[in-house]
Image (cartoon, helix red, strand yellow):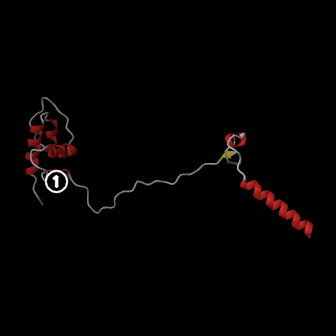
Amino acid sequence: MRTLLALVLVVYSAAALAQGTAPSPGTARAASNPPSFGGKPLVQVKPRTVAAKPKTTAKPQSPAEKLRGCLEIEDGSKGRLDCYDAIFPPKPNPKAPEAKAVADCRFTKEEDERLTCFNGFAERIPKF
């Protein structure tokens, strides 16, 4: 009985010492053999990151509502023109025809003329 107890103590202490010591970084085993199972290296799975969408109850705005929102910015300012350009990005055309729709204002080359064009259409949008 005593020999069995001595044998168990020796085995457990050897196992504890083997687990507590890590291989030094210079050893070949630590560098060349990554942990594996069945001859295949283990893969670390990263947690999935889901793009958090803001949970708002607001509906997406139509271009007309966005244009009406630009009217709140000071008239004749660069900020108002930037607001309009965010809705309809400018595509300057030196031979731009007269604008028949609000989207045609983006073809006007001069900033002042483009701002006037957008203002004309935005002010005519009816409020519901």
At x 46% / y 53%, what residue is drawn? 49
Residue ranking furthest to the top: 94
How many residues crowd mark 1 within 10 Å: few (<14), some (14–19), many (20+)?
Answer: some
**Which quarter of the rendering shows the C terminus?**
bottom left
Q: Is residue 72 left or right of residue 59?
A: left
Is 57 or 81 nearer to us in this picture?
Answer: 81
Residue 11 x/y as whole percent: 83, 60
- Taking depth in this image into account, of 3 and 104 the one nearest to the observer is 3
Can you identify the residue that label 1 sits on? 69
Question: How far from the left and from the top, in percent, is residue 98?
Answer: 8, 36
How far from the left and from the top, in percent, is residue 68?
Answer: 14, 53
- In percent of the image, x 10 and y 34: which residue is there? 97
The x and y percentages for residue 79 are 16, 45
Count the marks: how many? 1
Q: Looking at this view, is 69 or 20 the one in front?
A: 20
Quarter of the image containing the N terminus? Answer: bottom right
In the rendered view, does 30 fall on the left or right side of 50? Answer: right
Which residue reaches farthest bottom? 1
Q: Which secondary structure lies at badge 1?
A: helix
Which residue: 18% across, 43% down? 82
Indicate the amino acid at tag 1: Gly
Q: Quadrant of residue 88?
A: top left
Q: In this picture, is 85 found above or below 64? A: above
Left or right of 38: which side holds 76? left
